[in-house]
Image (spheres, helix red, strand yellow):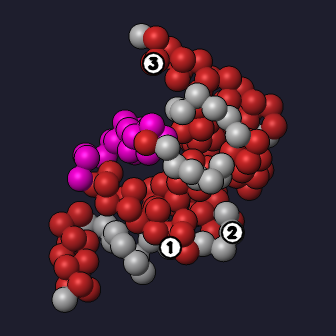
Amino acid sequence: MLDAFKDFLRSLSGEPIGRGGNEDNPLVAAAALLFHVAEADGTLSEVEGAKLRDLLTREYGLDPWRAEQVRRAGREADAEAVDLFRFTNVLMRHWSAEERVRFVELLWEVVFADGEVHELEDNTIWRVAELLGVSGRERMLAKREAQTRVQTQEHG
């Protein structure tokens, strides 16, 4: 019965969501990496979770229902993953260099959402950026841009 419900959800969206259909889905890979970075310090704060949901709707044009489905699939994929390459490989195949740099900026936005940058979060973004072919310079520029954006959103 659960499989039938999952098939129903897939038919509504036109794209597989849930187990078995996300190995090559860049949005699920992105959501998994966003979760991985947000939880790198051992906790996913409420504000980090809200930022993650906001990024899925704002950056990828998903309606709230679809964003929640992608978020859940990403969280499940991250929990099952043994390494980051599984996700970065998908993004390397599907996204341009500019899209990957922008994604690193989004990772920083999630990290800055709670006002603290833990060294494990910083290190995880460094590893993800390396796997995505994003240079150290681009990573640091993305960090600065994300920090400015988050501060502007807090005060604006």
* Classed neighbour count for the residue bearing mark 3: other residues with Cα under 10 Å, few (<14), some (14–19), many (≥20): few
Amino acid type assigned to the residue bearing label 2 in the image: Asp
Extreme-bottom residue of the structure: 1
> Could you tell me which secondary element the residue under label 3 belongs to?
helix
Q: Earlier in the sequence, mark 1 or mark 2?
A: 1
Residue 76 visible in the shown view: yes
Residue 81 x, y percent position in the rendering: 60, 72
Residue beneath disc 1: 23
Q: Is residue 86 left or right of residue 122?
A: left
Q: Which mark is residue 153?
A: 3
Q: Residues within 10 Å of mark 2 (few under 14, many from 20)?
A: few
> Would you say the residues marked 3 and 2 are in contact, meaning their CB atoms lie under 8 Å apart?
no
Which amino acid, by three-letter code, is at mark 1? Glu
x then y, percent, for residue 67: 32, 51
| Tag 2 residue | 83
Taking the magenta stretch, the answer to whether it contains residue 48 is yes
Q: How many marks overall?
A: 3
The span picked out in magenta is: 47-65
Nearer the observer: mark 1 or 3; the answer is 3
Q: Earlier in the sequence, mark 1 or mark 3?
A: 1
What's the CA distance linking mark 1 and mark 2?
14 Å
Eyeballing the image, is 4 above or below 132? Answer: below
Relative depth, front residue between 109 and 66 = 109
